[in-house]
Image: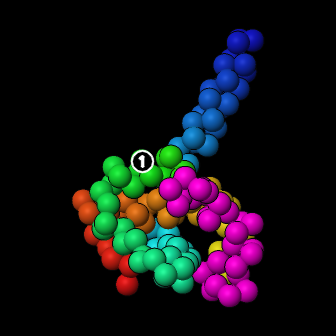
Amino acid sequence: MHLKFPMTLMALMIGATGMTTAQAYEGDWKRGRVYYRGVCTTCHTAQGSSPISPNARTMDEWSAYLKADKHAGGKDTVSQYVGKAYRDSIKESNKAAEKYADVPDEELMEDVRVFLLKGAKDGDSPASCS
């Protein structure tokens, strides 16, 4: 009889832990699209280079690129351009950065990742930059 309470408590703790893990953020491809087109495409175009369409790479290529976290040939990181500090630095002149100024970095990075995979050459909905 004394074991019932500790066993019930343990079951509740395991269940709560499982619920937390199951509720991991899945990404919002629409928010990722707005950010990618509004920030990434705008910046590439402003610097005189051509924008990189999501359908320019396969899902595996995008996954490897984002995992490596190297931008501009390794001169900087992809994550810095999704980070809050960067968004704060451009939000006066960029509506997408302003709109998502308070979104956690990890969520916004996941949003961009989901958009790129969905729009990849072999994704569910290959997308261009327009």
The colour scheme applied to this rendered structure is rainbow
Q: Is residue 52 above or below residue 45?
A: above
Q: Is residue 129 magenta?
A: no
Residue 107: where, in percent of width, then height?
A: 60, 59
- Apparent side of residue 67 relative to residue 123 in the rendered image (left or right): right
Categorize mark 1 by other alpha carbons within 10 Å: few (<14), some (14-19), many (20+). few
Could you tell whether 15 is left or right of 48 in the image? right
Instruction: Report the residue at 65% width, 78% height from top.
Output: 97
**Image location (x, y in percent) of residue 9:** 70, 26
Q: Residue at x 36, y 72 (%)?
A: 53
The C terminus sits in image quarter: bottom left
Image height of 99 relative to 107, above or below? below
Give left or right: position of 53 versus 40: left
The x, y position of residue 81, in whole percent, is 62, 65
Label 1, on which residue? 64
Which residue is nearer to you in this view: 18 or 92? 92
Who is closer to the viewer here, 13 or 28? 28
Question: Could you tell me which secondary element the residue under label 1 belongs to?
Answer: helix
Tell me if residue 29 can be seen. yes
Tell me which segment is drawn in magenta: 71-97
Amino acid carrying label 1: it is: Ala
